[in-house]
Amino acid sequence: MPVAAAAPQRRYPGVFIAFEGGDGAGKSTQAAALQQRLQAAGRTVLRTREPGGTPVGEKLRALVLEHGHGSIDPRTEALIFAASRAAHVHQVIRPALERGEVVICDRYMDSSIAYQGAGRGLGLAEVRSLNLWATEAMLPDVTVLLDVDPEQGRHRRTAQDAAEDRLESEPDDFHARIRGAFLELAAADPGHYLVLDAGADRDAITEAVSNRIEELLP
Ligand code: TYD
């Protein structure tokens, strides 16, 4: 099923930036680098992550990522991520945007659309609708997609940490479907995405992200 057209976006005084990409793309490093730059320029920045970002979200994170909770079917998995996101938007993201802060989120709705929609086969449009409901259609002002080749992503994350979570340990074809879905989402709404090659020089990526974000800031 095709990806639905962009939902109407509500405006807040703050700016909402999401980092997305496959496992091992370097999102956390880039999110931290952007936070540093913006804070050095005097901005108030809230950096957060999904799944997680709230006490209930961190519990849900453990439930869905750790091995050992028995089998979790795809719909349950999608609902757990969506529940964590609903709490995150309600308790953390929206209040910060209302206060006029810059919110940098390490993964957001597109991760569910890609991992549960494409990876688990639930359908991109279906998972998107679920998440629009869960977040009351809270969408990022810009999504930075760090595009990573699944094999390269696997190399990068095993170099950092040998233990893979439930999703990371899925085979390369699962990760290839996720990559395709992220690129499809970006192609369907180019004005809201910055797509960068995750294999490029780290500082060059930081520079490109900062330049794009500067354009959004009041
Ligand atoms: P990740 O950002 O990789 O956390 P960490 O850096 O601590 O490993 O996210 C954990 C995993 O959860 C990752 O494999 C992607 C997956 N995920 C989903 O499947 N759906 C979602 O909605 C989100 C937010 C993450």
Image (cartoon, rainbow, N blue to C red):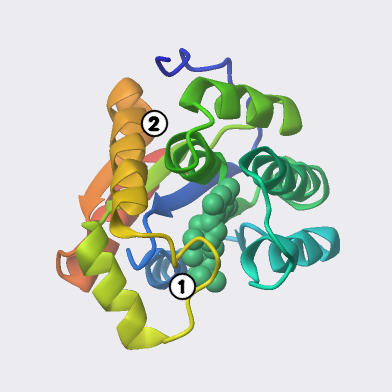
Name the residue furthest left: 200
| Residue 121 on image: x %, y % | 48, 34
Judge left or right: residue 215 versus residue 98: left
Judge left or right: residue 138 versus residue 217: right
Please, is residue 16 above or below residue 156 in the view? above
The disc, 1 or 2, on the residue closer to the chain's N-terminal end is: 1
Q: Amino acid at mark 2?
A: His
Task: Give the crowd class for mark 1: few <14, some 14-19, many >=20 residues within 10 Å.
Answer: some
- At x 68%, y 60%, the residue is 64
Camera-nearest residue between 148 and 40 = 148
Please, is residue 90 above or below residue 125 in the view? below
Which circle marks residue 36 in the picture?
1
| Residue 155 on image: x %, y % | 25, 76
Q: Quadrant of residue 184?
A: top left
Q: Quadrant of residue 83?
A: top right
Describe the element under mark 1 as helix, strand or loop. helix
Q: Amino acid at mark 1?
A: Gln
Residue under numbered circle 2: 192
- At x 46%, y 71%, the residue is 32
Q: Quadrant of residue 210?
A: bottom left
| Residue 114 on image: x %, y % | 44, 40
Judge left or right: residue 125 versus residue 79: left
